[in-house]
Image (tube, helix red, strand yellow):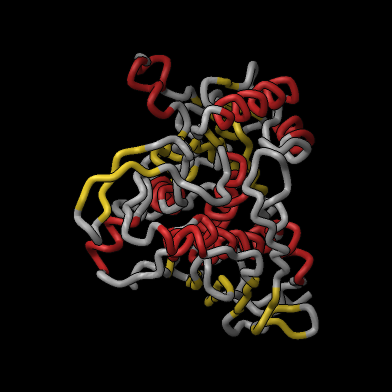
Amino acid sequence: MEGSSFGRCLRMTSWGESHQKAVGVVLDGLPSGLQLTSEDIQREVDLRRPGRSEISTPRREEDMVEILSGIFKGKTTGSPLSMMVQNRDVDSAPYEKIRNIMRPGHADYTYRLKYGFHDYRGGGRSSGRETVSRVMAGAVAKKLLEHLNVKVIAHTTQIADVSVEKTPSIREIEENSRSNPVRCADPKSADLMIKRIKEIADGGDSSGGIVEVVALGVPYGLGDPVYDKLDAVLAKALFSIPAVKGVEFGAGFSSADMRGSKMNDPYGLKDGRVVFESNNCGGILGGISTGTPVVARLAVKPTSSISLKQKTVDVGRMEEVDLGIEGRHDPNITPRVVPVAEAMMAFVLADYCIAGGLIPERFTK
């Protein structure tokens, strides 16, 4: 199965399926001498771990990170770094019952068409379970970016028809987005979001939302025109996250309603250097980072598995049937996309920083 590797100088290859023994990732291209512990990885993985709140799947995975190679005495060796977590709380029985029934909104039918034979349990390779591999890789990328004082943080700005009431500051995002299960920086909006998720779930349905991810301290000059523009590669990385159906940077789709005089970011001078007086470009112009915060937003679709009856086809008997899905599923996947979005943006930025020589081939301290 192709398409499991990503990156140029820094490269990740994820492996594993939802109901196999484990999922993991191999990172190649890391500099040697980077101080890194399992706690650094675990801290990020815990943010996406299932079964932690009343609005997430009841599947309870410990997700204890195991580092298999690439670290010696608390530092990277420069050889491939391999990490994994076990799949322990697995119940495949519900999937055996519907193995020939194509679940609407899932990749069952497309995987069947392309591969013929695949692991259908829990979505197999297309499951959101795969994203734990990305979070492990992103944790390492964040450690690399720390040496450049680059910080990546994401938060939920919308759940269903409930949006944050005001644009939060970076401080509010840092202080509040980890303190509630929807990962929202505005506590009042977070309470409304939780209530809305429950209301929709009580009706047997699911909901979606919007995640914003921001990178601060990004050096100017990252990005390689024409086909490796920074926003183009970031878009690929963010679109590869399961359930993401839209990505925008800066003003994004709202720029279609703007005049050029409003969309263009004016230049000014501050302390003898050129500065941007606004950031509608989202930190990227011509595919190259401007030095201002890189800002992206992701549209996350409603969770595909719902208990409401939906029309589908049993391909074993080749007849139309109605399907209401049983099992353990998130009523809204948006909060768990937050750490994955951080991971993918951090990984791309770290990759570009290595390519540009901003991160050394080895750390000596």
From the top left corner, tell me how far across and down residue 197 is, in percent. Answer: 60, 29
- Residue at image coords 70%, 33%: 170
From the top left corner, tell me how far across and down residue 63 is, in percent. Answer: 69, 65
| Camera-nearest residue between 92 and 289 | 92
The correct choice, above or below, for 21 with respect to 287 in the image is below
The correct choice, above or below, for 319 with respect to 80 in the image is above
From the top left corner, tell me how far across and down residue 259 is, in percent. Answer: 35, 14
| Camera-nearest residue between 286 and 145 | 145
- Residue 59 placement, left or right of 121: right
- Residue at image coords 75%, 30%: 172
Judge whether residue 243 can be spotted in this image: yes
The quarter in which the N terminus is drawn is: bottom left
Quick one: which residue is furthest to the left in this view?
318
Judge whether residue 208 can be spotted in this image: no
- Residue at image coords 57%, 44%: 330
- Residue at image coords 63%, 75%: 83
The quarter in which the C terminus is drawn is: bottom right
The correct choice, above or below, for 138 with respect to 264 in the image is below
From the top left corner, tell me how far across and down residue 23 is, in percent. Answer: 56, 70
| Camera-nearest residue between 320 and 112 | 320
